[in-house]
Image: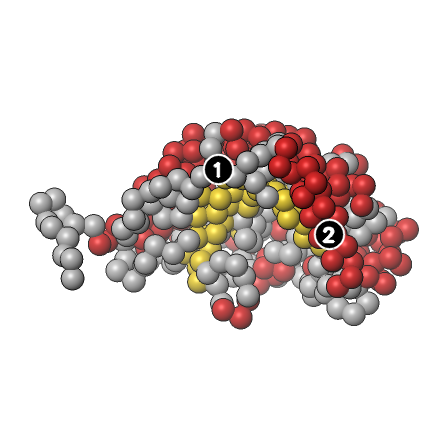
Amino acid sequence: MFDTMPPMQEQGGSGQLRWRLAEDEESGTLFAKSALSERHVGTGEYRGMEFFHVNARTIVNKVPATSKMPFSYTINAYRGCSHACTYCFARPSHAYLGLGIGEDFERRIVVKLNAVERLESELRSPRWKGEPIAMGTNTDPYQKAEGRYHLTQGIVGVLAEARNSFSILTKSTLVLRDLELLADASKRTHVRLALSIGSLEREVWQLTEPGTPPPDKRLEAVRRLTQAGVRCGVLIAPVLPGLSDSDEELRAVALACLEAGAISVTPVALHLRPGVREHYLEWLGRARPDLVELYAQRFRKGSYQPRAEQNRITEVVREVQESVGHRYWKPRPPVRRPPQVPAHSKPAPGEQLRLL
């Protein structure tokens, strides 16, 4: 059992996972007994990682209206993320599971084994009206674990078959594995991808996002996705004070993304909410102590930087798009698709749809 594992090494880890494990589910019908286990210890390219198998009761999550997010429904097949981004806002979610937000978040990954089956079931529900679904809103759907479990691949297939629109945010070039699948989905429904590329400087990338592909590889992913007909934008996110926030660096990233064919380039200034703030500033004190005072000033009033700084970042990128963006891409005409009909409301063979 998970309880018998060695104690957590991180401060704040409780030693017990606060989630029903796969073998604890009452039905036990989705998987063979031999496939049900609390955890799998990674070997080979996954060495140093642990995967905790769980059966999720639901996979489509309703976003609280108070969150003010630009989407209402999300899917997260994994909890924790091997990208190990120092600033990741999702780190505190691991504490809720009884795990640490540092190395535990990066190496102990919760895997919702039944994600694809749950999605198929939930899309058939009469209560589901075909609303857009966002992925990558918590942890990356194309992180390293996806190479082993293929859950995102299965989810994209189900959404495409149902003609249910969706969006994906990722830092990973593993998305190219599903290039044909995403291109086909784009012909069936509205699909929007975004790659997160915060800096082109390899030193900054290696320091702050050690588990991600290098930025030039992500730019190539943008190019290939766009050429395949998949609408792909870029988030310059997050823009890090003292590391990637100079006007020159912002211009360079924005220009490179437009040259790669990005349909949009949007900067996002770093914000540090409680939990992440403490983790990030502790890391900063070790990695770049020369920047500690700058961060103390920028975040002295709370989780967000001063509005003037946020506006500066936005304005620099906007000017690049306005001055040179039209050279590299032209808006494609919208793809005309048949009206979306949720799976549960499709007529049976020979049955005529009612007009009233």
Q: Which mark is residue 332?
A: 1
Residue position for label 2 = 315
Q: Residue at x 20, y 50 (%)?
A: 346
Percent x, y of residue 349? 12, 44
Percent x, y of residue 69? 54, 61
Percent x, y of residue 96? 57, 63
Q: Could you tell me the amino acid type at mark 2? A: Glu
Element marked by disc 2: helix
Camera-side residue of 322 and 248: 322
Q: Does residue 153 appear anywhere in the picture?
A: no
Left or right of 351 in this view: 186: right
Q: Residue at x 52, y 39 (%)?
A: 331
Q: Could you tell me the amino acid type at mark 1? A: Arg
**How is the structure coloured here?**
secondary structure
Percent x, y of residue 81? 59, 47
Q: Residue at x 38, y 34 (%)?
A: 184
